[in-house]
Image (tube, grey):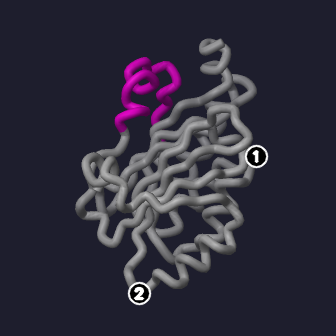
């Protein structure tokens, strides 16, 4: 089953600009393809390296997607056949990011349907920077997503309004000791 899954999933390392809204622009290039995995952690003020899995129907689709991403200005590496990336790196993307000022951490339940991520990003707009994003499709009705967002104290009220209007279940994890030990 794992071999069949690998043939239907392209694993890519993509570099995108580190600024609010760039994640949304990247997802628009992915289009209506199903994102099966997304791992990212803020590490550099200029560029973000994202580890992304995308559902594909056949190998040619992966090559087309890579061409589309590169044509849109996103340096892209195909990691589909990289055993270290698939077995280890996907779990190690992240680490501490003390330079991610005003970061708050939330768990979300995203409906497992195409467009759920884009809905989240469109509702959020370009107001805040995403400094951490971790998602892996596990075949359930809802995807468990962990998101770090840089929200200055003056934006707490507009951020709460965003949460209320989003329509997804959520829980704040900013005070979780695991976050403080390994990610903040």
The residue lying at 43 percent from left, 60 percent from top is 105
In the rendered image, the quadrant that contains the N terminus is top right
The outermost residue toward the bottom is: 154
Under tag 1, what secondary structure?
A: loop
Residue 130 located within the stretch drawn in magenta: no
Question: From the viewer's perspective, is 58 left or right of 96?
Answer: right
Judging depth in this view, the residue of 10 and 96 nearest the camera is 96
Judging depth in this view, the residue of 65 and 134 nearest the camera is 134
Checking the image for residue 34, the label placed there is none
The residue lying at 25 percent from left, 64 percent from top is 99
**Vertical side of 174 occupied by 57: above or below:** above
Tell me where residue 147 appears, x and y as whole percent: 48, 56
Checking the image for residue 154, the label placed there is 2
Tell me where residue 106 appears, x and y as whole percent: 49, 59
Residue 17 appears in the figure: no
Question: From the viewer's perspective, is 113 left or right of 161?
Answer: right
Question: From the viewer's perspective, is 31 left or right of 41?
Answer: right
How far, Cα to Cα, is label 2 from label 1?
Answer: 33 Å
Residue 151 appears in the figure: yes
Question: From the viewer's perspective, is 160 left or right of 117?
Answer: left
Checking the image for residue 113, the label placed there is 1
Disc number lying in front (2 or 1): 2
In the rendered image, the quadrant that contains the C terminus is bottom left
Tell me where residue 44 appears, x and y as whole percent: 29, 57
The residue lying at 72 percent from left, 49 percent from top is 111
Which quadrant of the figure has residue 5?
Answer: top right
The residue lying at 65 percent from left, 68 percent from top is 122
Q: Earlier in the sequence, mark 2 or mark 1?
A: 1
Q: Residues within 10 Å of mark 2 (few under 14, many from 20)?
A: few
Region rendered in magenta = 76-92
């Amino acid at each position: 089953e794992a071999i069949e899954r690998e043939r239907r999933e392209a694993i890519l390392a993509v570099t995108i600009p580190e600024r609010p809204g760039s994640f949304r622009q990247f997802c628009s290039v992915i289009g209506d393809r199903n994102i099966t995995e997304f791992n990212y952690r803020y590490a550099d003020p200029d560029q973000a390296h994202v580890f992304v899995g995308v559902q594909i129907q056949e190998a040619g689709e992966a090559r087309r997607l890579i061409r589309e991403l590169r044509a849109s200005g996103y340096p892209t590496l195909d990691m589909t056949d990289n055993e270290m990336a698939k077995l280890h790196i996907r779990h190690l993307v992240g680490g501490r990011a003390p330079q991610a000022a005003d970061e708050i951490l939330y768990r979300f339940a995203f409906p497992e349907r195409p467009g759920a991520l884009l809905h989240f990003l469109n509702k959020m707009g370009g107001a805040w920077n995403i400094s951490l994003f971790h998602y892996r499709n596990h075949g359930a009705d809802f995807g468990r997503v962990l998101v770090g967002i840089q929200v200055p104290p003056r934006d707490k009220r507009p951020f709460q309004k965003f949460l209320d209007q989003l329509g997804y279940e959520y829980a704040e994890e900013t005070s979780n000791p695991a976050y403080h030990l390994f990610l903040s």
